[in-house]
Image (tube, grey):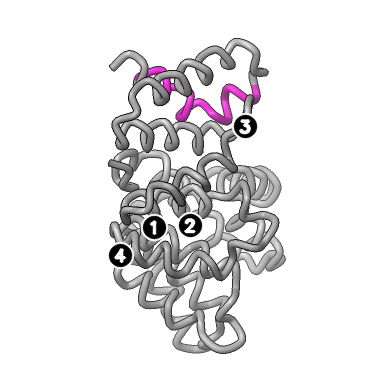
Amino acid sequence: MLPFITHPAFYTITILLQAICVIHCVRSRTQQNWIYLIIFLPLIGSLVYLFSEVITRRDMRNVKAGVGEVFNPSGSLKKLEENFRFSDTFNNRILLADACLAAGQTQRAIHLYEEGLEGAFSENELGISRLILAYYQERRFEDVVKITPRIISLPQFAKSKSHILYAASLGQCGQPEKAESEFKKMNGRFGNFEARYYYALFLRQQNRQEESLNLLHLIAEEIPQLSAVEKRSNRQWLNLSREALRR
């Protein structure tokens, strides 16, 4: 089984970190380009923003306050709601939806994303990618499969989180051949560890135990050859692959 909630910690931490950065960006009125960097490159973009705009420009008390808002998000949500009521723009809607998603208000986030993806913004990659994530959290796999074709032709889709969730959702929707076709596109050596881990789980789901083990063994064999940076950035998926082998 491949539901988002199987490994909630990574996604929760990433979304919380994004929310901290987005809220800080809105309040400090920094360049809007930061918001897109934070959204499109969740972990890296958020860390770059923190060290460029928060830690180097504010004292640590402000950072602590921002963290507190995310773990108790009513204050930040209220501010974003006020912004949205004052100006019903696509950007304000997405920021509010992201904050709702980070606060665990997934159904509300979905509603906001869906209403935003109309008219001129119906093909917006940012909104669609976030909606795919929200659908997946709610195990609405058919909706993931239905909406993904809107962005599937974009070059950045090939190595995106949305691609992984799309492949996993195809498997959940009884389309194993299509799912495997998508997983194979992401099954390269010395990289794409998250996608390959999910591919191994998919193979196990299909009762192809030997193939699943072979893929996990390949990942384990690659670990000693990775740089320290690569190991750190892929730590969760490398650890999960090793744990799956032990099981």
| Residue linked to disc 1 | 102
Say which label, 2 or 3, has the lower sequence index.
2
Instruction: Say above or below: 247 vs 22.
Output: above
Discs 3, 4 touching: Cβ within 8 Å: no
- Which range of residues does the magenta coloring cover? 229-243
Q: Residue at x 55, y 43 (%)?
A: 60
| Residue linked to disc 4 | 105
The three-letter code of the residue at mark 4 reads Gln
Query: Which numbered disc, 2 or 3, marks the residue closer to the eye?
Result: 3
| Residue linked to disc 2 | 19
The three-letter code of the residue at mark 3 reads Gly
Discs 3, 1 touching: Cβ within 8 Å: no
Q: Nearer the viewer, residue 177 or 44?
A: 177
Discs 2, 1 touching: Cβ within 8 Å: yes
Say which label, 4 or 2, has the lower sequence index.
2
Q: Position of residue 115 (x, y in %)?
A: 43, 83
| Residue linked to disc 3 | 188
Whether residue 185 is visible here, answered yes or no, is yes
As helix, strand or loop, the secondary structure at mark 3 comes to loop
As helix, strand or loop, the secondary structure at mark 4 comes to loop
